Image: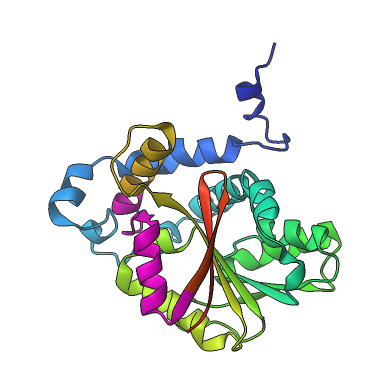
C-alpha cells in the first residue's frame, strides 16, 4: 500500500516532489563534495572552478537546466496554496513574477483571479516552458513571458512585483541589485511581495530551523547566497528603497509586503 509520503514520488500527484528528489540526488548532493573548501574560502563550487556563478555553470548542461526547472516547479506547487491563503491578489491589476521560471506561481494566481494580468520575467531559457504552460491553462491572452536578466533591468509593466525564493540565492550586494531594479519600475503606490523562508533569530533545533539551516549550506555551496532572518530581509529591503509594511505567514515561508519609501 502506497503511503502518503510515497505518493509524493508520483509525478502526477498534486503535491509531487519527484522532480525535487531528482534534483537533490543528481545535482545538490554533488555540491557537498568540497563543502569544506567553500567554508574555508567563502567561494561557491562554481567560483572554485573560476566560473562566475552556479547558474552559469548549470546553463552549460541543458539536462541540468531541465532538472532544475522541473524541481523548482514542484517546489512552487508545494507552497502556492499557503501563499494564496496568505495574500489577496485581487487588489493587483498587473502582477510580475521576477525570476518566475516556467510560470507555475503565475498560473495559479491567474486561475484564481480571473481579471488579473501577469508577466513572468526570467532568462530566455525559461520562455518555451512558460509559454506552453500558459497555453495549457488557457491564460495566454492575459499572461505573458518577458526574457531578460534581473541584474541588468526589470520591465516596467506592473503595479506589483513578487520575488519568490530568489533573494536567498545571492549575497547582499547582488540582492540589492535585484531589489533596486524592481524599485525603479514600480509606480509610487506599487507593492513588492518578497516570499522567502526566514532563519530564526536565535538558534533552534526544530524541523523548520534545521531545514532552513540545510538550505543555508546549499546556498553557500551553490549560488553563493544565504538564508536570512526576518530582520536581515528588512534591512535589505530598506537599503533598496522599500519600506516593509506587513509580514504574512504562509506555512514555513514569510511574505513580506513592502511599499516604496
Locate residue 59: give its quadrant: bottom left
> Which residue occupies the foreground of this view, 199 or 145?
199
Locate residue 172: give its quadrant: bottom left
With 39 as the anchor, is 234 left or right in this view? Answer: right
x, y (%) of residue 119? 68, 73
> Which residue occupies the foreground of this view, 144 or 230?
230
Which residue corresponds to the image point at 34% horizontal and 42% vertical from the top-left?
Answer: 213
x, y (%) of residue 86? 65, 54
Work out whether residue 175 can be spotted: no
Which residue corresponds to the image point at 36% horizontal and 47% vertical from the top-left?
Answer: 200
Is residue 223 part of the magenta span, yes or no? Answer: yes
> Which residue occupies the foreground of this view, 137 or 63?
137
Is residue 98 part of the magenta span, yes or no? Answer: no
x, y (%) of residue 140? 82, 69
Q: What residue span does the magenta drawing correspond to? A: 219-243
Work out whether residue 235 can be spotted: yes
Q: Residue furthest left?
A: 40
Locate residue 1: give its quadrant: top right
Q: Residue furthest front?
A: 245
Amino acid at each position: 500500500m502506497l503511503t502518503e509520503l510515497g505518493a509524493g514520488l508520483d509525478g502526477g500527484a498534486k503535491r509531487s516532489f519527484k522532480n525535487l528528489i531528482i534534483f537533490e540526488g543528481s545535482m545538490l548532493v554533488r555540491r557537498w563534495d568540497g563543502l569544506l573548501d567553500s567554508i574555508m574560502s567563502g567561494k561557491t563550487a562554481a567560483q572554485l572552478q573560476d566560473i562566475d556563478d552556479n547558474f552559469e555553470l548549470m546553463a552549460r548542461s541543458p539536462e541540468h537546466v531541465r532538472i532544475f526547472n522541473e524541481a523548482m516547479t514542484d517546489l512552487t506547487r508545494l507552497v502556492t496554496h499557503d501563499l494564496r491563503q496568505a495574500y489577496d491578489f485581487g487588489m493587483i491589476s498587473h502582477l510580475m513574477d521576477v525570476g518566475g521560471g516556467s510560470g507555475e506561481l503565475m498560473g495559479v494566481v491567474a486561475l484564481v483571479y480571473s481579471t488579473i494580468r501577469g508577466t513572468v520575467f526570467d532568462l530566455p531559457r525559461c520562455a518555451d516552458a512558460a509559454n506552453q504552460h500558459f497555453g495549457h491553462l488557457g491564460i495566454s491572452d492575459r499572461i505573458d513571458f518577458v526574457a531578460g536578466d534581473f541584474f541588468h533591468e526589470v520591465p516596467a509593466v506592473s503595479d506589483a512585483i513578487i520575488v519568490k525564493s530568489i533573494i536567498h540565492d545571492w549575497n547582499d550586494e547582488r540582492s540589492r541589485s535585484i531589489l533596486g531594479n524592481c524599485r525603479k519600475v514600480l509606480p509610487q503606490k506599487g507593492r513588492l511581495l518578497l516570499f522567502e523562508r526566514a532563519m530564526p533569530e536565535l538558534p533552534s533545533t526544530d524541523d523548520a530551523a534545521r531545514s532552513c539551516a540545510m538550505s543555508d549550506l546549499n546556498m553557500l555551496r551553490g549560488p553563493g547566497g544565504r538564508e536570512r532572518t526576518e530582520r536581515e530581509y528588512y534591512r535589505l529591503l530598506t537599503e533598496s528603497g522599500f519600506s516593509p509594511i506587513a509580514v504574512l505567514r504562509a506555512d514555513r515561508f514569510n511574505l513580506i509586503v513592502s511599499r516604496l519609501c
